[in-house]
Image (cartoon, rainbow, N blue to C red):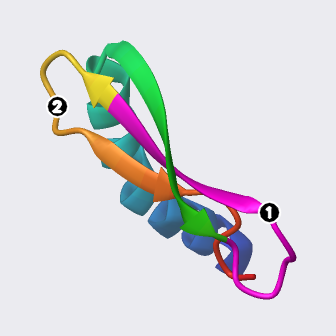
Amino acid sequence: MSMFGKLADRLLAMVAPTTEAEAACVLISTVRTPAGYCAGADGVVRYKITRNYDSCAPKVTYSCTGK
């Protein structure tokens, strides 16, 4: 097997289990809550985004991360 084939197999093995687990989660709701202001951006509101799932833990992300 070529080096690229082995690399692709390893990548697929790492990604496939999370993809199947994510597919089992059914999104119930998405809630956007103001959470201050973005750093370095004048007056841009930062939001906390919570995604609630039926049988999985909620996932929290923030808008303007890394800014």
In the picture, measured across the screen, residue 40 lies left or right of residue 17, that is right
Tag 1 secondary structure:
loop
Q: Is residue 46 magenta?
A: yes
Picture coordinates of residue 33, whole percent (x, y): 47, 42
Observer-nearest of 6 and 65: 65
Rounded to the nearest angstrom, the CA distance separating label 2 from label 1 is 31 Å
Observer-nearest of 8 and 63: 63
Residue at figure coordinates x 24%, y 39% from the top left? 58
Q: Is residue 55 magenta?
A: no
Q: Quadrant of residue 7?
A: bottom right
The answer to whether mark 2 and mark 1 are in CB contact below 8 A is no
Amino acid type shown at disc 2? Cys
Tag 2 secondary structure:
loop
Q: Name the quarter where the N terminus is drawn.
A: bottom right
Q: Name the quarter where the C terminus is drawn.
A: bottom right
Q: Residues within 10 Å of mark 2 (few under 14, many from 20)?
A: few
Asked if residue 59 is positioned above or below residue 44 in the image, the reply reads above
Q: Which residue is mark 1?
A: 44
Amino acid type shown at disc 1? Val
Q: Which residues are magenta?
A: 38-51
Task: Please state which of the two labelled residues, at mark 2 or mark 1, is closer to the viewer.
Answer: 1
Residue at figure coordinates x 68%, y 81% from the top left? 66
First reached walking from the N terminus: tag 2 or tag 1: 1
Q: Quadrant of residue 57?
A: top left
Residue at figure coordinates x 32%, y 14% from the top left? 26
Picture coordinates of residue 47, whole percent (x, y): 57, 52
In the picture, measured across the screen, residue 5 lies left or right of residue 22, that is right
Q: Residues within 10 Å of mark 1 (few under 14, many from 20)?
A: few
Q: Which residue is mark 2?
A: 56
Observer-nearest of 50 and 7: 50
Residue at figure coordinates x 61%, y 63% from the top left? 8
Residue furthest to the front: 43
